[in-house]
Image (cartoon, grey):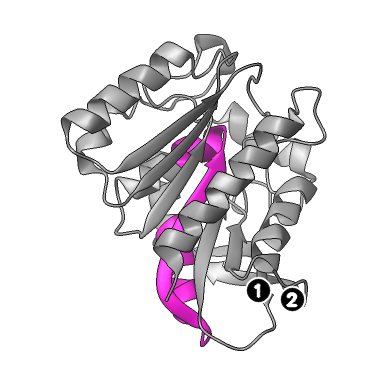
Amino acid sequence: MTFDMKAETIAIAGAGGDELEAYLAQPLAEGRRGAVVLIHHMPGYDRSTNEIARRFAAEGYIALLPNLYSREAPHAAPDDAAATVRARGGVPDERLVGDVRGAVQHIQGLPNANGKVATIGHCSGGRQSFLAAVSLPLDAAVACYPGAVVTGPPPASGLSMPPLLDRAKDLQCPLLGLFGDDDKFPTPEDVATLDKELQAHGKVHEFYSYPGAGHAFFDVDRPAYRPEAAVDGYKKIAAFFARYLAS
């Protein structure tokens, strides 16, 4: 692990050629690197997701975090930007895929990239990581407690995200899923349904569920944080990326 890195705010081209703000963190050591597109959660492009990007850079990967709310609220605080996007039903799926495609293309143009790219996301970002993995030719994808994959979002959420279970047959890369047994969205039953559907289509995937953990167990700033589950989850992510993103 190296902690010598460069982290900066840049601009990339997203869906439709729109300019997006993005946070790029990468190791300073020489050599070509695998890369991770980090898809932020519904609370937005915030400090905690920037910290995750730097974590992956410290582990030797190029990490790129696009601001999915750049269009609706380019200069707003994360909470305000998230409220604006939530009021509009969330990020449209087609646009999300275009934004991730733009992030992948930006990475592949970097001189230190080895060409291999994974996505990772938590909560709504986990769903969007799954969406990217069934839509784009990625090398790997990680979905941490992704909601609205098996069922749509709760009616009270105001979000307009269709279920993605019927897209399981389109998965284009190995998938790592990390879940909490006490989660209500997705429930353990949702996880079992998705697991069964992926198995039926012969898709490479690994699912792990943690007892005593609920939603957002990775988030150190929330009461839901569960250290043992988060530490083991990061170990599984590290092993997964080492397997699929190496040169």
* Horizontal relation, residue 97 to residue 10: left or right: left
Kind of residue sitting beneath label 2: Met
* Horizontal relation, residue 214 to residue 97: left or right: right
Q: Which span of residues is magenta-colored?
A: 100-128
Pick whichever, 138 or 85, lies toward us. 138
Could you say whether the residue bearing mark 1 is in a helix, strand or loop? strand
- On whether residue 108 falls in the magenta region, the answer is yes
Distance in Å between CA atoms under marks 2 and 1:
5 Å
Badge 2: few (under 14), some or many (20 or more) residues near its Cα, within 10 Å? some
Can residue 9 be seen in the rendering of this structure? yes
Pick whichever, 142 or 107, lies toward us. 142
* Horizontal relation, residue 167 to residue 66: left or right: left
Q: Farthest left residue? A: 201
Query: Which quadrant of the figure contains the C terminus?
Result: bottom left
Circle nearer the N terminus (2, 1): 2
The residue wearing badge 2 is: 5
Q: Residue at x 49, y 79 (%)?
A: 113
* Percent coordinates x, y for residue 115 in the rendering: 40, 75
The residue wearing badge 1 is: 26
Disc 2 + disc 1, Cβ < 8 Å: yes
Kind of residue sitting beneath label 1: Gln
Q: Residue at x 45, y 25 (%)?
A: 160
172 is higher (above) or lower (below) than 146: below
Q: How many marks?
A: 2
Badge 1: few (under 14), some or many (20 or more) residues near its Cα, within 10 Å? many
Query: Which quadrant of the figure contains the N terminus?
Result: bottom right
Q: Residue at x 49, y 62 (%)?
A: 242
Pick whichever, 106 or 1, lies toward us. 1
* Percent coordinates x, y for residue 35 in the rendering: 51, 67
